[in-house]
Amino acid sequence: MKFLKSVSKYMKPYKKQYAIGVLWLIAIDTVVLFVPQILRSFANDFQNGTLIKANLIKYALLTIAAGLFTSIGRYFWRTNIFGSSRKVEYDLRKTLFRHWLNMDSEFYNHNKVGELMSYATNDINAIRGFTGDGVMMSVDSSFMLILTIIMMIRTSGLKITAITLLPIPFCAAVIIAAGRIFYRIFLARQEAYSYLNDITTESFSGISVIKAFVEEDHARARFEDANRNYYNKDKNVVKHTTFLFPFMVLLAGVSYMLVIYIGARYVVNGTMSLGDFIAHYTYVGIIMWPARSLGIIINIIQQGSAGMERIESMLANKPRIKDADNPISLPKDTATVEFKNVSFSYPNDDRLALKNISFKLENGKSLALVGKTGSSKSTIAKLIFRQYLPSSGEILIDGVPIEKINLHDLTEKSGYVPQDNFLFSETLDENIAFSFDEYIDEEHIHDAAKMSGVYKDIIDFKDGFQTVIGERGVTLSGGQKQRVSIARALIKRPKLLVLDDSLSAVDTDTEKNILDQLRSIDPTMIIVAHRISTIKDADEILFLKDGEISERGTHEELVALGGEYNEMYEHQLLESELENYDGKSE
């Protein structure tokens, strides 16, 4: 079975623990199967009038010993089997998370957070159910079924055993037929749960937008639809699976009826002793457990199989962007960037976002990218950090083609502040020192905060740098989030610094102070901006229009050119003068 082959590779590291757990389980089952023999001997002694006090004590002690051994053994098999299943769950979740960390931006453009979370929770929990309860019940029921039948035959003969077990084949046939249906309905339920998880996560992430636009009713309706869909799928699972248990109880009742009817007649006519009848009746009770558990095992296997199929399909996704087999290391003390006739289109989009972009940024120089919204300024930044690969042309970092470089080297010597200033729900100093695994001295954190212009804001907080910010930095203003993100990049003292519209939420005075601080560490710098004041001192400015470089030069050269850059500059100057005028008139 494909499912067993897939899940066995995760169970293999713990085969020793599983083996110990199985041995304890078999030992307990063996003891349980001899308890009816104790009852048989007791009943026969009583029937024959040979029951003496010594034998009575012996039977009582044997029964107590069996109970004690069963209790102790249950601890050991549970520790080994269920403990191993938890380790399998841990390994699977770790493997899945590491796989996601290696995936590129395109993957996350097509997979939602809530859906990914359902893989790491519901699907892996279903697999854990098989590696724990499934393994235990499969071993337990198989061993008990076989050994109990043997003991029944030895105790009361083949004929009455065969008659008693007549319902078992019908039970097996129904379970096998039901298994095919269960797989489909379990898979449908997993997918419905995934969609519900996605709707819930998206709603909470965008709760401020929902409330701002008074869209609570719409959000409630979307959640209700997803919740109703999952409810219906789950109800379908319950409807089908709950049929099995009463069916097994019915078959067990038939078996009990047969053993009482036939066994009682045998005892009356002397064909069977009272002890044999009691033992056989007890064995019927024991064998009903593995018979009933077949339905539960089928459920567990089908749930695990559906979960494993989804996990395997997820792990089958491979990143399009990864290190070459023999990556070339980059120098640590320089940073140059060169684009040679680079064109690029986003996946599943035939339109070129960039067209024949060429420039060379020397070490320690600054390059500014400016243009109207949608001119693909940020796309250039994403290509530099290999979030995407160019459709044509060549990108060189320190003279090395980007597809041949060691990505770790590039990220280690670079600082990137994207438009989305994502902050973690941790303390401010932890957010600033995020890129370091080891302990960072407070002085370095404070220096980075000072360079980014956020130091004074932080020390005004009650807990200072130990202030825990809300999810995604919700407790900070837009300008504060931008400056904390800049501090997170600057603490690395990067040789290459890319600011993607990272100063849009701060005032011009703060902006000037930050830019002056940046020049003091002399990085090779790329600044993406809409505000001319942010980039006018750059060594070279590229004005982008529809993914192409329409104008290039220094600020003075572009103003003198009198083109679109100059038009944008004059428009912003007019806006600034109007703001100053309004401020004075007030």
Image (cartoon, rainbow, N blue to C red):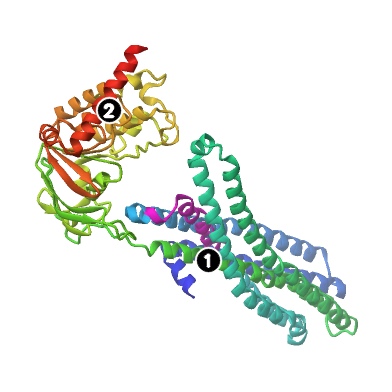
User: In the image, 584: left or right of 269?
Assistant: left
Q: Is residue 188 left or right of residue 47?
A: left
Mark 2 or mark 1, which is nearer the start of the sequence?
Answer: 1
Q: What kind of residue is marked 2?
A: Ile
| Residue at 18%, 34% in the rendered image | 566
Crowding around mark 2 (Cα neighbors within 10 Å: few <14, some 14 to 19, many 20+) is: many
Answer yes or no: is residue 43 visible.
yes
Q: What type is the residue that disc 1 sits on?
A: Ala
Residue 361 rendering spot, x and y as whole percentages: 11, 43
Displayed quadrant of residue 491: top left
Q: Quadrant of residue 284?
A: bottom right
Residue 409 spot, x, y in % from top left? 19, 47
The kind of secondary structure element at disc 2 is helix
Q: Residue at x 61, y 58 (%)?
A: 74
Q: Is residue 454 left or right of residue 82?
A: left
Q: Range of the magenta residues?
A: 108-137
Numbered circle sitting on residue 445: 2
Does 403 appear above or below 292?
above
Kindly tell me whether residue 453 is visible in this rendering: no
Residue at numbered disc 1: 306
Choose top left, top right, bottom left or bottom right for residue 252.
bottom right
* Local SS, label 1: helix
Q: Where is residue 529 drawn, in percent x and y?
A: 25, 36
